[in-house]
Every structure is written in structure tokens, then in C-alpha cells.
Image: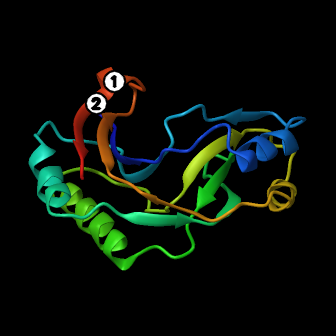
Amino acid sequence: MQTYLELQVPIRNDAKWFKDLRTVFRDKNVKWQHGHYHITIAFCDETPDVDLCPILENHLCSSVSPELTFDYLNAFRTRSGIYIVHLGVTDIPDSFNSLVDAIRKDLSNAGCKILSDFKLHITLGRIADKTIRLATVQKLIKSIPLPRFTLKLSKYVFREYENYNDDGIIYQKEII
């Protein structure tokens, strides 16, 4: 079973920068994310049939809600060849990186197979068009001014990958 731990990010679809981004790509075939914005802490390509909640509880109950300043838009190409249009953070707090590393290490030690490295980003849209170049996508993105904004994030959800609704929730924790 594939699972993942996400940290939810409350992004508004009606924010001016997001509207402008969608407008700039109106002639491109972008599959925009509609809600469910998050940072994937760990994607487990294989998850053993064991209760991982105590591991998550151990880390999340002792951590402080991270405060992240979102300050850039960009795109990258995945191994499968699609482009991910995303929101990012330039200065990631050491405490957040340490938390992510510790969670991923403990999940791996518990038998989870984690193949992808951690890359802090919030997916806003996906482009599967093989005729468009990454440089073109990035040029369009750079035309959008993004005001820096800081969010204190507190809601973690551990989900089964196949289920995108509440039925896929295995574990949920909000840190106040």
C-alpha cells in the first residue's frame, strides 16, 4: 500500500497571484490543483502492515507548528516527464528540516520504502504536454509577482495514496 504524510497548507484559490498564474497559463493544458494543498513530508511507495501512528505521534506531539514564508513560484520536471508548477520556500527553518528527516528515517526503519527525496513545494498545477519546454513554463511563471506571505502550519494528515477523500485518512493530528 502507498501512503503519505502531508502538512496541509491553506492557500486561497482567489488570491490575486494565483488568479494571475492561472490566467498566464490559460492557453496551456494545465491540470490545476483544486484545494488539498499540502507539503508531502514522506511518500511511502510501500508501507508495511504495521501501525505507524505511534511513530507519527512521537514526532508530532513533541514538535512546534512550523512557520514558513512562501516567497517564490517555479516549476520542475518529474521523472515521468510532467511539469509541476509549485509554490516554494527559500529559507526552510532547520527545525522543520530536522523534523522531516527524523520522521522519514523512523518510517524507513519501520519498513516503509521511501524512494523520493524530500523537496519542499506545494503543487499548484501539473502540465503533461510534452511539446512545451520547462524554460517556457518557468518564463511564464516569472511574470507573476508573488507577495511573500508567512503561514503557521499545524495540520498533518497520513493518507492512503489511492483515496483522495476523508476515507483515505489513516492518521490526523493538528498541532496547536
Residue type beneath disc 1: Asp
> Where's residue 83, x and y in %?
70, 49
Check residue 48 in the rendering and tell me which mark sits there, or answer none.
none
Would you identify the image quadrant in which residue 3 lies? top left
Colour style of the rendered protein structure: rainbow
Label 2 secondary element: strand
Question: Residue at image x 86%, y 45%?
Answer: 24
Q: Position of residue 125 (x, y in %)?
A: 67, 41
The residue drawn where x is 46% and y is 73% is: 92
In the figure, residue 74 lies in which quadrant?
bottom right
Kind of residue at disc 2? Ile
Q: Tell whether label 1 touches label 2 (CB within 8 Å).
A: yes
Residue 171 x/y as whole percent: 21, 37
The residue singled out by tag 2 in the image is 169
Residue 139, quarter of picture: bottom right
Label 1 environment density (alpha carbons within 10 Å; few <14, some 14–19, many ≥20)? few
Within 10 Å of disc 2 (Cα), the crowding (few <14, some 14-19, many 20+) is some
| Lateral position of residue 53 relative to residue 149, left or right | left
Is 109 positioned to the left or the right of 142 in the image?
A: left
* Residue underneath mark 1: 166
Query: Where residue 97 sits in the image (x, y, percent)?
Result: 36, 71
Left or right: 140, with 115 as reference point: right
Q: Nearer the viewer, residue 148 or 34?
A: 148
Q: Secondary structure at mark 1?
A: helix
